[in-house]
Image (tube, rainbow, N blue to C red):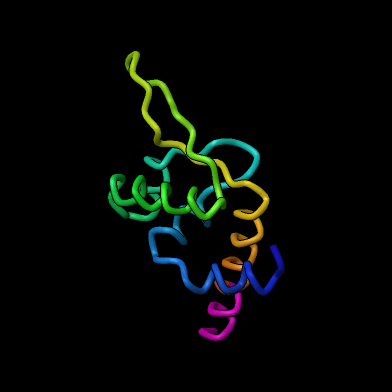
Amino acid sequence: MTDDDAKYIAQTLTSPQREILLNSNGDKITSLKTVSETSGIDHYILKHESSYLQSMNLLEVKRSRSGGEFHYNCVILNDRGLQVQAKLNEQKLKKNAANN
């Protein structure tokens, strides 16, 4: 993915999609429950949006086990997701600098 592609994707994401990418990483899985608690966005909205991000090939949805049942509620960013995350962080820094 080119930098321009990553920038375009970062600009077109919805707020829940941004929260997922900003609060996840590529080293270990991140629970959508944690993202929900951090962002204040409903877990089920995040679960739906993570499926969309997976279809864009930005992350993988992983399953976790709770009480003997498997739930698909964890995510891990791939290289493309990390590129878009870097662009989101750049946008966030520029916005913060403009506000100060």
Can you give x and y, in whole percent of width and height, for residue 19 in the image?
44, 57
Q: Nearer the viewer, residue 75 or 36?
A: 75
Which residue is at 38% across, 59% downward? 16
Please say if 56 is above or below 5.
Answer: above
Q: Quadrant of the N terminus?
A: bottom right
Q: Residue at x 60, y 36 (%)?
A: 28
**Badge count:** 0
Q: Is residue 97 above or below residue 43?
A: below
Q: Quadrant of residue 92?
A: bottom right
The residue lying at 37 percent from left, 40 percent from top is 33
Quarter-wise, where is residue 67 in the image?
top left
Is residue 68 on the magenta stretch? no
Q: Please state the horizontal and vertical placement of residue 5, each as a whole percent of the image.
A: 63, 70
Magenta-colored stretch includes residue 98:
yes
Horizontally, residue 79 falls left or right of residue 35, namely right
Q: Is residue 87 above or below residue 40?
A: below
Q: Nearer the viewer, residue 6 or 67?
A: 6
**Which span is picked out in magenta?**
93-100
Q: Nearer the viewer, residue 100 or 43?
A: 43
Q: Residue furthest right?
A: 2
| Residue at the outermost top position | 68
Overall secondary structure of the magenta section: helix
Q: Find residue 18 and report its horizontal and vertical position in percent.
A: 46, 61
22 up-or-down from 13: above or below: above
